[in-house]
Image: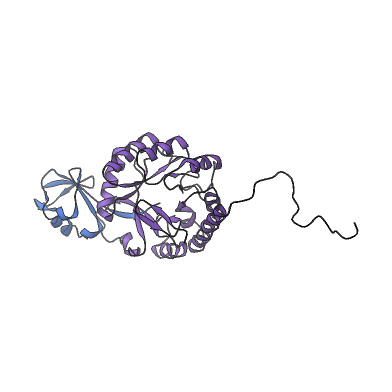
Amino acid sequence: MDLFTIADKTFSSRLIVGTGKYSSPAVMVQAHEASGAEMITVAVRRVNISDRTKESLLDYIDMSRYFLLPNTAGCYTADEAVRTARLGREAGLSNWVKLEVIGDERTLFPDNEQLVEATRVLVREGFVVLPYTTDDPVVCRKLEDAGAAAIMPLGAPIGSGLGIQNVNNLRIIREFARVPLIVDAGVGTASDASLAMELGADAVLMNTAIAGAQDPAAMAEAMKLAVRAGRLAYLSGRIPRKLYASASSPVEGLVGR
Amino acid sequence: MRITLNGDAHELAGPLTVTELLVRLDIDARRVAVEHNLVVLKRELFDRTTVGDGDEVEIVNFVGGG
């Protein structure tokens, strides 16, 4: 079994999926099942006090089957993110957090300075911190030094579906990373997920690519297979790239020569 | 009394415990986290924490996200 461990938890699926943007809870449930994911992300938001008729997200998540990873999406300062992480811990009763500290509204790029600071604070408080960051090797190293349990560089902006934009940065991060490397955000289709895994990512996290597809359950299955295929290709050791051809069939014994 | 609940002014009879507040708001305590005057409460403190006039309370739950 090709297992994957973060902190004290071991997973057999290397695909982590979100719960946002689905057209209905039923569609989400089907997609989650098809994805084979064992860890799913959720957001922490104020309860709607005036309208209590809305169903709870947790009504649709089998907690015995999925491990919940609360995020701090939408937070713009380390303080806000720390506060949200503490609330998420109490709501979910686990000390894991997908840490996001956003620095810019249009790109949703992280504010890495605040992110490193929030990581330090939360690690000190006993959290298992999985920070979402840019594909910057220096920042990833700082996050590791701050005690992050994994590093989660983006492939492209959140929800953009642009795919892996900087293959070489991810290769560099792969070389030095001592904690699990999870490519988080930017995946648009299955080949993007495969590429991330072929580069040596330990896992891929995505939401929009599945939730926004015309058939989310089918795309979730495609992603499951793509992550598995990319992982196998990485472990298999690909051939070197060569500029010229090298024949697959024997060059001896050709008829008429 | 008047409290600030999820950012909005809210009038209700009080003081009361967090558990009583959640019952009054028809909120399942097992599904939410509560912050009282900027301190996140452990669930076991809901019965013992009193919300009084002028207090700030945040009640959050999980929603869909990535």
Residue drawn 27% across the image and 46% down it: A126
Residue A17 is at least partly visible in this image: no
Total count of labels: 0
User: Compared with residue A31, is residue A147 higher up or lower down, i.e. above or below?
Assistant: above
> In the image shown, does A183 or A104 lie closer to the viewer?
A183
Dividing the picture into quadrants, the one containing residue B29 is bottom left
Residue A132 on image: x %, y %: 41, 44
Residue A162 on image: x %, y %: 54, 46
- Position of residue A182 in the picture relative to residue A229 (left or right): left
> In the image shown, does A3 or A128 lie closer to the viewer?
A3
Q: Colour of chain B?
A: blue
Residue drawn 13% across the image and 46% down it: B2
Residue A217 is at least partly visible in this image: yes
Q: Which chain is painted in purple?
A: A
Q: Residue furthest right?
A: A256
Residue B14 on image: x %, y %: 9, 51
- Position of residue A20 in the picture relative to residue A229 (left or right): left
Indicate the colouring scheme: by chain
Q: Residue furthest front?
A: A252
Residue drawn 15% across the image and 56% down it: B19
User: Compared with residue B54, is residue A41 higher up or lower down, i.e. above or below?
Assistant: below
User: Compared with residue A100, is residue A66 higher up or lower down, i.e. above or below?
Assistant: below
Residue A214 on image: x %, y %: 51, 60
